[in-house]
Each structure stands twice: as C-alpha cells, then as structure tokens.
Image (cartoon, rainbow, N blue to C red):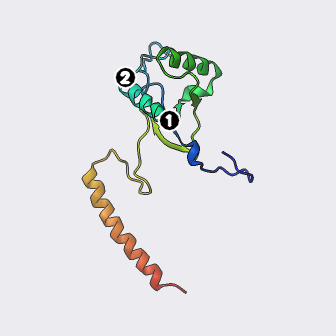
Amino acid sequence: MLDKNDKYTYNEKEEWYGVDLDGTLAYLDASIFPIIGKLIPLIFEKVKDLLRLNFRVKIFTARASEVDEITRIRKWLKENGLPNNLEITNIKDYNCVQIWDDKARQVIFNTGYFLDTTLSKQIDEMKINKINYKGYENDKKTNKK
C-alpha cells in the first residue's frame, strides 16, 4: 500500500500468505505445461486451514505476468475447491507474511544463513559472530567522541 508520500507501508490488517502454484499447490509436469497439474493434497489442506481462519491468501506465481494465465488459474482454483476470487500475483509487498514456494531458499532473519544448511554448523558460526559482534559493540562505546 502507498501512503500519501508514495512510500510503501505495512498494514497488519492487509497481511497475506503467498502460495506458489506450479510445484507447490499443483504438481508441475513440464510435458503438459501450460496446463496446470493436479492438486497437491497436503498443501491444499494447509491453504484451506488458512482460509478457514480468515487469513488472506494469494496465489503467488510467475504465471501472473500473463493475462491468459490468470483465467487458467481461476478456472483451476474453482475446479479444485478453492475460491476462484483469490488474488493472483507475482509481486511481494510489505504485507506479505510468508511465501510457500518450491524454489525459495529460506534465510534466517538478519543473519545471512540458509535455514537448510547443517544446523550445528550454523550455531557454531553464530556463536563466533556473536562474540565478535559484542566485541565490536564494546569498541564502539569506548571510541565515542
């Protein structure tokens, strides 16, 4: 959302979850593309849970860049028991809370560490960096002008 100064702002009431289509909500089969594959039941149930709890869900897909694909997606949603009026986008904004996507690689907030790497290695590295960071903070306090 844009404020009066044309800056993007966060609004808790507009929070949303983005769910990728191909390979996440629907099976991706390159041999039949652009036809949308069959529904993936596990993620379908999670999306239904979000909707039952009145969370805002958007279909977050590269297909959104083509007008013809929006129509195809809406038809697929209806055929598979999801509201066909869900928003469809390929743009993330400040109100996006999570994106569920087969291609994304999660980074631990404010660290630069990938979540899917060995956890014990990350913990060791984070301990070292925390020690160095605290030392840096102490240096800053003693060098104030």
Is any atom of residue 3 visible in this view? yes
Residue type (three-letter) at the residue carrying disc 1: Asn
Can you tell which quarter of the image residue 14 is in? top right
Residue pictured at 42% horizontal, 17% vertical: 29
Which mark, residue 39? none
State the residue in front, 52 or 48: 52
Residue 97 in the image, given as x and y percentages of width and height: 50, 44
Marks 2/1: CA–CA distance? 20 Å
Task: Report whether residue 34 is seen.
Answer: no
The outermost residue toward the right is 4
| Amino acid marked by disc 2 | Pro
Q: How many marks?
A: 2
Q: Which mark is residue 41?
A: 2
Between 59 and 122, which is closer to the camera in this rendering? 59
Local crowd at mark 2 within 10 Å, few (<14), some, or many (≥20)? few
Q: Indicate the quadrant containing the C terminus: top left, top right, bottom left or bottom right.
A: bottom right
Residue displayed at 42% across by 19% down: 39
Judge from the rendering whether residue 21 lies leftward or rightward of residue 64; answer left or right.
Answer: left
Direction front: furthest residue: 53
**Residue at position x 62%, y 28% from top?**
65
Secondary element type, mark 1: loop
Q: From the viewer's perspective, tell me whether residue 119 is left or right of residue 140.
A: left
The nearer-to-camera label among 2 and 1 is 1
Q: Quadrant of the N terminus?
A: top right
User: How packed is label 1: few (under 14 Cα within 10 Å), some, or many (20 or more)?
Assistant: few
